Image (tube, helix red, strand yellow):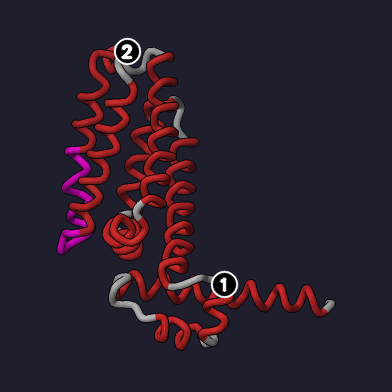
Amino acid sequence: MNVKSRRDENAAATRAALLRVARRLFADQGYAGTATEEIVRRARVTRGALYHHFRDKRDLFIAVLDEEHQKLASQAGAAAAAQPDPWSAIVASSNAFLDACVDRAVQQIVLIDAPAVVGLEKQKTDEAYLANLKLLIRAAIAQGLLDDQPVDPLAHIIFGALHEAAMLIARGDDKQAARRSVSGAIGRLFDGLRGTSSGR
């Protein structure tokens, strides 16, 4: 192994350690309650190593958030891919997202801290999710699984409902109970949004 590849491996390991420790601290203590000094101490790296990989704490948080979004997208995508049609894919991926919101890290990092800390970056992620949702809605309409209707407002209604349901889970004293409590309401919402196509 040459010096460059060993150095690259060490750099990758340092970055991974910072992300792993930061995720745990951001989840447990929140963004505001987490100090960079504690991150580097627990990751067993120097402050210089932190600032070699990330501009500041906010930059590190954005990297952690990006990993969380990737995990959520992967879980939702896997749930959607297992379904026989686009409407079922919407329902399954939505439930996969709500299931993930039981995780303390998702609650604190994605739902609570991200809007305040990253602003526009969070908006871009929302837009990407909405774009995918609109594609599935159009496909469901094209296949006669959903009544023909304006796509944009329906996508925003679904997105807004899921966000509020996720926040109920995040704020609940018993996360599992909160998840169960939103399940029936979300199911009825989807049945109502589907309209007369459900009888076809």
| Image: 64 above or below 94 | below
On residue 3, the disc is none
- Residue 128 is drawn in which quadrant? top left
Q: Position of residue 117 (x, y in %)?
A: 33, 61
Sequence-first disc among 2 and 1: 1
Q: Residue at x 50, y 75 (%)?
A: 18
Is 109 included in the stretch rendered in magenta? no
Element carrying mark 2: loop
On residue 53, which mark appears?
1
Q: Is residue 103 visible?
A: no
Whether residue 184 is visible, yes or no, is yes
Q: Residue at x 84, y 77 (%)?
A: 2
Q: Is residue 109 above or below residue 41?
A: above
Which quadrant of the rendered structure holds the N terminus? bottom right
- Helix or strand or loop: what does disc 1 sit on? helix
| Predominant SS of the magenta segment | helix
Which image quarter: residue 11?
Answer: bottom right
Front one among 108 and 176:
108
- Residue under the point 22% across and 37% down: 186
Quarter occupied by residue 85: top left
Position in image of residue 89 (x %, y %)? 41, 32
How busy is the neighbourhood of tag 2: few (under 14 within 10 Å), some, or many (20 plus)? Answer: some
Give the magenta part as a residue range: 171-185
Please state which amino acid type lies under the numbered disc 1: His
Q: Where 176 sits versus 186, above or below?
A: below
Per the rendering, the mark at residue 148 is 2
Q: Nearer the viewer, mark 2 or mark 1?
A: 1
